[in-house]
Image (cartoon, grey):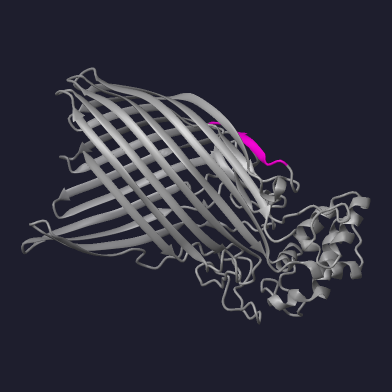
Amino acid sequence: MDVIGNYQEDRASGTSFKSLGFLPTDPVTGAALGPSDPSTGAALAAPDGFECGRGLGLDRKVWGVTVIINAGLNDSVRLTSITAYREFDSLEIFDADGISLPVLTAAENAFGEQFSQEMRLSFEGERVNAFIGAPYFCEDGFQRTPAQFDERAVLASLAGALNGPIPGTPANQPAPLGVFANTAITGALLRGVAQASGVALSAAQAQAIAANLKPGHLESATNFGRTEAIDLFADATFQLTDALELGAGLRYTSDDKRSAITGAVLNGRSILGAFIGALSQPAPVRNALLGALSVPGAASISPSAAFPVPLFGLGLQPSAGNGNIVSAQIKDDGFTWRLNARDALGAVSSLYASYARGRRPQLLSAATPAPPFGAPRFEPVEKERVDSFEIGARTETLGRTLFLDAALFYYLYDNFRTTVQEGTLFVTTTAGEAKSYGVELQARWAPSEALALFGTYAWNRSRFEAGIREGNRFRLSPDHSASLGASLGLPIGPGRLEFVPTVTYQSEMFFDDDNDRPDLQQPPRALVADLVQDELQGGSALANARLGYAWDGGLRIDAYVTNLFDERY
C-alpha cells in the first residue's frame, strides 16, 4: 500500500494583462508612465470595494490524497486499486482591460472536488501481457465570474474616444478618469453612439442619461457542473515472435453530466447596457426606454408598469428573478480503441506503427440569457473525436555511437473543441474538422565519453479545415521547432565536470485558436472590437547553459542559465 498526500497554497500577483493599444498612464493626471511594449511594466489597479476590497492577485489552495494498493494474487496476476480525492479552491482578481482606468475589473472564483476509484487486474505471461480495469470518476464544482465596469470608461472605449477630447492627446494615451465624469463629454459620446445606429438624440437627453452612467456597475455569472463517469477497458500485447509484437485495447465510457448557470446584476441595472439595447428597438419602444433612462436615479428604480425598463446587464444579462439557477442534463457513452505493432528489425533497430481512436464526451455549454430575465442557453457540444496514426523507427549505428529516431504522425479531428467569446464570457463550442500532421526527428552522437552532440527537429502543420476558423492554426502550435546541444564531460578529482550548452528554436505561433483575427473579434462576440492582429509570437531562439559537477558518491551540484541572451518572447 502507498498513501500519497499533497497540499499546495499559492498567493501570486496573478494574471497581469497589459493593453497593446494603450499606454500605461496615471489615472488621475493622464500622464504616460511607459510604452505599450508587452515586456515593460503595466499600470493596473482594482477599484475600491470590488470583491470586499481585495487587491489584484491569486489566492489558491489545492490538496489531495491517493491510496494505491497492489496485491500479487500469484506469479502472473496482480490486482491494483487506486483511490483518490482532490479539492481546489481559488480566487483570482485581475484588471482585464490592461490599463489603469477601471474599464473592466474581473474575478474568477473556482471550487471543485473530485473522487475516483479504479480497479485493475493485470496478467504477465511468456507471450501475452494484458490488463482489464473499471474506473469510476465524480466531480462537483462551480466557477463564479463577477465583473465591475466603469460605464463612462466603457462608453469612451466603445466610441473610440478613450483618449478624451483633450487637444494633442495621442490616440493611444487614455485621458484622466476625471474627464469622463463630465456629462457634457459623455453625453456627446452617447449622441455619437446613437447616431452610428441611425438614432438622433438631443443634447439635453444625452446629458441626462450620461448623468446616470455608473462608475461601478456590478454583475456576476456562476456556472455549476457535476460529472459522473464509468469506464471499462481491456488491453493486451501479444509477442508473436521474438521480434514482432502486436497490441490492442478497447475502452467503453459512460458519462452523465449536469450543468447549471445563473446570472445577476448586483447593484441595479446597467444604464449603458439599457441604452445599447434601446437603440435596436422600434421607435416607440426605443423612445420610451431612452426617456426612462433620462430619469434621475434610473439605475436603481425597480421595473414596473410605471417604469417598464428591464434589469439590463452590460457584459451579461440576468436570469429570471435576477439570479435564479437553471440546470440541464446530458448523457453520453461511446468506445475508444487502439492498435499497435512493433518489429525489432535487428539488435539495434526497430520499427513501430499505431492507430488510435480518441474522444471527448458530449457536454452542455451554458451561457447566460440573451435578453434580461430570459432563459439561459444550453448548447450541446458534440463529442470530439480524433483518429491518430503514427509510424516510427529507431536505430543505432557507427558502433552504437549514433542514435537516430524518426516518426511520422497524422491526426484527423471531428468536432474539434475550442472556446469562443460572447461579450465578457468564454463559451465552449466546436470548430468542425481539423487536421494535424508532421514529422519528428531526433539524433544523438556520442563518439566518446567526453563528448555527445544531440539535436531535434519537428514539423507540425495543425490547421482548422471548416467553419469560421477555416485555415487558422491551432493555438501554441508552431510549424517548426528545433533544438541543438552538446554535453562535454571531463573526469576531475573524485567526480566529473559537465558543461551542457543548448539552443532551442520555434517558429511563429498564435496564442488562441481564433488567431487574433479582427473579423472574429467584433461585437456581439466581443464587448469591444479588437481590430489589430498582434496576439502572436514571432520565431524565437533561446540559448541555455548548465555547468555541473557530480561526485562519485552521488552528490551533484549545478549552476545554470536559461535564456542566456535575454531574448524577449
In the displayed structure, does residue 323 sit left or right of residue 15?
right
Q: Nearer the viewer, residue 228 or 550?
A: 228
Give the answer, above or below, for where 21 lies relative to 74: below
Q: Can residue 413 be seen by looking at this rendering?
A: no
Q: Is residue 225 magenta?
A: no
Asked which quadrant contains residue 407, the reply is top left
Residue 91: % across, % down: 50, 58
Q: Nearer the viewer, residue 198 or 566?
A: 198
Q: Residue at x 84, y 68 (%)?
A: 296
In the displayed structure, does residue 477 sit left or right of residue 552?
right
Q: Residue at x 62, y 56 (%)?
A: 533
View extreme (right): residue: 284
Residue 17: % across, % down: 55, 63
In the displayed structure, does residue 359 sit left or right of residue 294?
left
Which residues, given as a range, are shown in magenta? Answer: 375-383
Asked which quadrant contains residue 60, the reply is bottom left
Asked which quadrant contains residue 328, the reply is top right
Q: Residue at x 90, y 58 (%)?
A: 199
Give the answer, above or below, for where 165 lies relative to 430: below
Give the answer, above or below, for where 362 lies relative to 371: above
Q: Can residue 75 be seen by looking at this rendering?
A: yes
Q: Is residue 379 magenta?
A: yes
